[in-house]
């Protein structure tokens, strides 16, 4: 690894189930992590995985089934060294934001429960952004930006062009009764300029300066590629 390699912080969840139905699992959507990791790795970036509480990040069962369980996800799932990275994620207290050039929030419905309330992640995100770094998220990952404020007290997403998992997709995925809030509406209430692709579940990424967001699991590659273009 080059001493001058760009450094990226990948954020994953610690949550294992929906609050309203503990018997219904929801965890890290594996391909959203692996697609990003693969692309960043090809660019020679140094990567660290962090979670709100540190420690284990469990895997969403639906992300381990066709068509989501693709070559990238399978390769990670079958690699003990890679899986170990999800058993021992860093906690926000372990992270010095000044060391990182970008932060990338992965998804899965689980992040709706533990990303927004993490003050540690909020501070890291703010510092990376204000230091000129890239802030990015895919699918439900943009829940991690809901409570992030800049030093001037304004919300990071206010007035910015963004996308993320849409309410229409929540309904089509049949989880609209399980999710704790409508994140699309929450973003609009914060003043974000939310948009979505005409068709659900197709790749869609939005770039607004150093803010990059992707709409759904199928957007992970496009989102990461746009982050890499900004990082160089």
Image (cartoon, rainbow, N blue to C red):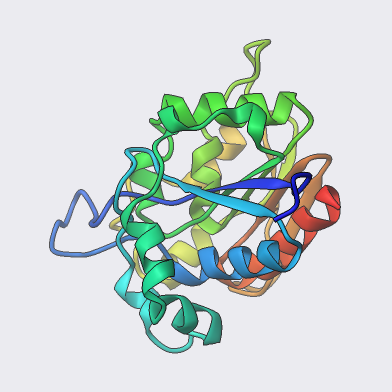
Q: Is 7 displayed left or right of 161 in the figure? A: left
The residue at the point 58 percent across, 38 percent down is 187
Q: Position of residue 231 (x, y in %)?
A: 81, 49
In this view, 122 is above or below 207: above
Q: Position of residue 6 (x, y in %)?
A: 74, 47
Determine the residue located farthest toward the top in the rendered image: 152
Quadrant assignment, res 224: bottom right
- Residue 176 appears anywhere in the view: no
The residue at the point 63 percent across, 70 percent down is 38
Q: Position of residue 121 (x, y in %)?
A: 49, 32
Number of marks present in the image shown: 0
Q: Is 191 displayed left or right of 55 in the figure? A: right
Q: Is 37 displayed left or right of 66 in the figure? A: right
Picture quarter with the N terminus: bottom right
The residue at the point 59 percent across, 31 percent down is 125
Q: Is 95 displayed left or right of 181 in the figure? A: right
In this view, 152 is above or below 196: above
**Who is closer to the viewer here, 133 or 61?**
133
Q: Position of residue 52 (x, y in %)?
A: 38, 38
In this view, 42 is above or below 64: above
């Amino acid at each position: 690894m080059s001493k001058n390699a760009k450094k990226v912080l990948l954020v994953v969840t610690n949550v294992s189930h929906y609050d309203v139905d503990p018997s219904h699992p929801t965890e890290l959507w594996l391909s959203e992590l692996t697609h990003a990791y693969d692309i960043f790795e090809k660019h020679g970036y140094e990567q660290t995985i962090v979670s709100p509480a540190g420690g284990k990040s469990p895997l969403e069962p639906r992300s381990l089934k066709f068509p989501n369980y693709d070559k990238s996800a399978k390769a990670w799932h079958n690699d003990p060294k890679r899986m170990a990275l999800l058993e021992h994620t860093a906690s926000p207290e372990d992270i010095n934001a000044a060391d990182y050039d970008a932060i990338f929030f992965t998804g899965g419905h689980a992040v709706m429960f533990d990303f927004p309330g993490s003050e540690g992640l909020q501070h890291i995100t703010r510092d990376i952004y204000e230091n000129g770094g890239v802030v990015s998220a895919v699918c439900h990952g943009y829940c991690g930006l809901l409570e992030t404020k800049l030093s001037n007290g304004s919300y990071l997403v206010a007035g910015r062009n963004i996308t993320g998992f849409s309410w229409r997709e929540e309904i089509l995925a049949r989880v609209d009764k399980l999710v704790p809030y409508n994140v699309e509406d929450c973003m609009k209430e914060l003043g974000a300029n939310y948009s979505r692709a005409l068709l659900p579940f197709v790749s869609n990424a939005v770039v607004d300066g150093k803010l990059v967001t992707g709409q759904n699991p199928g957007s992970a590659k496009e989102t990461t590629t746009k982050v890499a273009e900004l990082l160089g």
